[in-house]
Image (spheres, helix red, strand yellow):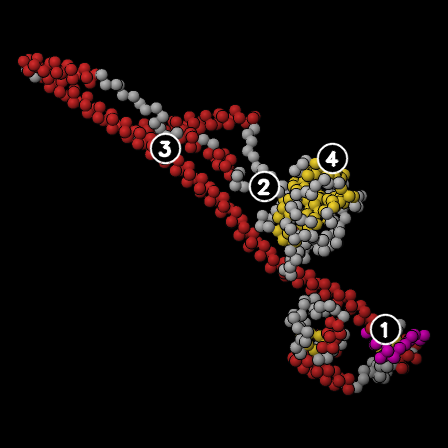
Amino acid sequence: MASGILKAEIDFSCPICQDIFNDPVVLSCSHSFCKDCLQRWWSEKTIHECPVCKRRSSRSDPPSNLSLRNVCEAFLQEQQKASSKPEALCSLHSETLKLFCLDHQQPVCVVCRDAKTHKNHRFKPIDEAAKDYKRGLSSRLKPLQDKLERFHEVKLICDDSARRIKEQAHLTEKLIREEFEKLHQFLQKEEAARITALRKEEEQKSQMMKQKIEELSREISVLSETVRATKEDLRATDVFFLQNYTTAVERIEQRSRMNNPQLVSGALVDVAKHLGNLTYDVWNKMKHKVSYCPVILDPNTAEPNLRMSQDLTVVIRQYTKGWAPRNPERFEGYLTVLGSEGFDSGTHSWVVDVGNNADWAVGVIGESVQRKAEMPTGCWSVWFHGGKYRAFSPTVKDKALSVKKPLQRIRVHLDCKTKKVTFSDPDTNTTMHTFPVTLTEKLFPFINTQNAVPLEICPVRVSVKLDEGDFVTRRRLLDGLEGLTSAIVSFVFGEI
């Protein structure tokens, strides 16, 4: 029975006062509290949130939890009945247990107090000892309750993150399909254009060959008729032959003056033109349809009030009540987003179009930098604020920079070999400032903006270059393809 009462006391205890619920009310998150306890709690807060899970309550007067109130009243009645029963007795002396031995940590009767077993021991009245120990247990319970609240908070964040994962995957799949559809459309259009060119050449050369065949057929018909008529003259009687001899000779001489038939040069389809370096030529044309950015922004690091473009190259400050996962990588309180890739070797350069943004910072930042601080350390940057340009680093806290005219774009050049990061104006190729950097970890590109004007990572020009060392090999492959194509054409036309 005692264990049942203890369990009920835990189940029926208000999380705030740790006592049995008195006029309990229930919040939308299903947590219940004493009405007075909740109102006192909220009076010290700026927002009405659940004291357990921190979820915001939409109502300032939550409804009563009638079921819980009835159960608590029944429980209190049961406690009263239990307390009205005879007091617990000492198993040795059958006396009421009124004292608590502090040395043995157990209830005793007045006879036990005078026994040798408890000689020189310290005692307290049962009610005082119970009150003291309850107070001590409550103080020990408080950190555990705080930990429970933290577990609830993290679980809520994880639940939201689980939903966000599905949303991210769905949106990303949609954008991937859209990008590939653009490529499909380009390839389909290119394929159709090349098939059209092939068929046009086929039609032109087929028409030319048809005309040639018709011309040859006419000439063959004329020559055949001449041969037939001459053979008839040869078979005729001598008198008839001699009478028509002159005419037959003139007819043969006339036909002999006809030009000999010639094959048409370039009559066949120029297969090499249509097949030679086909994929390379298409890819070369495709470079005008694609873009490359040296830095791609990572939306999982963006402060919740920053928004990215679909291609993750543009960032803009946009204060909103929208939700963003509280993942460890995300900045909070500092309007910053990182590039998706960090660098600890090689040289890397990117240009940020700042346009008319009046409050921005760009540069590189250490991977382990504190992301929940307002102004993190461990970064090398140029900051534009109040119409002035300043340089910041772990060793240079605030250095004014001399810039002749406002920048529209700024280049960041990180050289991990020389351990330097340089900021310059790409339009005038003028260096603004150079920092020595510490390379104990990866450095990530970052952008900070306090202004509602977008900042953009500029794409770089895509070019196609053939390596000279491969030229001979490529030429041989192309010659081999042309030879193979000619052999195939000869075989096909020979079969025809």
| Sequence-first tag of 3 and 2 | 3
The answer to whether residue 92 of the structure is visible from this angle is: no
**Residue hosting label 1:** 105
Q: CA distance from mark 4 to mark 1?
A: 70 Å
Q: CA distance from mark 3 to mark 2?
A: 37 Å
Asked if the residues shown at circle 1 and circle 3 are in contact, with their CB atoms under 8 angstroms apart, the answer is: no
x and y percent of residue 215 in the render? 25, 26
Residue at 52 percent across and 24 percent down: it is 472
Q: CA distance from mark 1 to mark 3?
A: 106 Å
**Residue hosting label 4:** 418
The amino acid sitting under disc 4 is Thr
x and y percent of residue 138 in the render? 80, 71
Q: CA distance from mark 2 to mark 4?
A: 26 Å
**Residue hosting label 2:** 292
Q: Give the magenta range.
A: 118-134
The amino acid sitting under disc 2 is Tyr
The amino acid sitting under disc 1 is Gln
Residue at 70 percent across and 66 percent down: it is 54
**Residue hosting label 3:** 201
Element under label 4?
loop
